Amino acid sequence: MTVIYRISHAPEPAFKKRSILGTPALIGDEMPPTKNMVDGKLYTSKSAMRETYKPSGNAEGATFTEVGNDPAMLRRSSRLKPDRAAIKATVGRAFSRAGFGA
C-alpha cells in the first residue's frame, strides 16, 4: 500500500476559521406573557416591561431592580456542623505526638 502525503502551503479556507454555529446567539425582545409586579399587567416585551421600572414610569417614583425567579437563590445553604469532639481529639493527638500534651 502506498501512502502519499501532500504538503500544501496555501492558507486554510475561511470556513475552517469560522465557528461551527450557523449564526451568533441573539437575545430577542419577545418573551412569554409575564406578570409585572409593579403594575400587575402582563407583558410580552422586555423593553416595555423595563419601562415601568424607571422612576418616571411608576407612581411611587422608586427605581426597581429585576431579580429573576431562580428558586436556588431563595434556599438556605445547608452547612454541615463541625464535629467538635473529633476536632478536639485530633488536636489532642497532635499535641501528644509533639510532646506538649498528655
Image: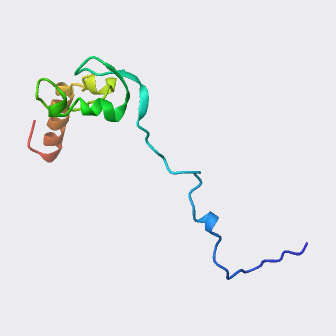
In the image, taking residue 32 as reference, residue 20 lies left or right, namely right
Residue 20 visible in this rendered orientation of the protein: yes
Residue 78 visible in this rendered orientation of the protein: no
Residue positioned most to the top: 40
Residue positioned most to the right: 1
Q: What count of labels does the image hold?
A: 0
Front residue of this view, candidates 26 and 5: 26
Q: Residue at x 36, y 22 (%)?
A: 34
Q: Residue at x 27, y 17 (%)?
A: 40
In the image, taking residue 11 as reference, residue 24 lies left or right, namely left
Return the x and y of residue 28 as percentages of the image width and height. Answer: 44, 39
Q: Residue at x 33, y 23 (%)?
A: 71
- Residue 99 lies in what quarter of the image? top left
Return the x and y of residue 30 as percentages of the image width and height. Answer: 43, 33
- Residue 20 lies in what quarter of the image? bottom right
In the image, taking residue 3 as reference, residue 58 lies left or right, namely left
In the image, taking residue 43 as reference, residue 77 lies left or right, namely left
Front residue of this view, candidates 11 and 48: 48
Front residue of this view, candidates 64 and 51: 51
Q: What's the coloring here?
A: rainbow
Q: Specify the quadrant that holds the N terminus.
A: bottom right
Return the x and y of residue 90 as percentages of the image width and height. Answer: 20, 35
Q: Residue 102, relative to residue 6: is it above or below?
A: above
- Residue 27 lies in what quarter of the image? top left
Return the x and y of residue 26 as percentages of the image width and height. Answer: 46, 45
Q: Specify the quadrant that holds the C terminus.
A: top left
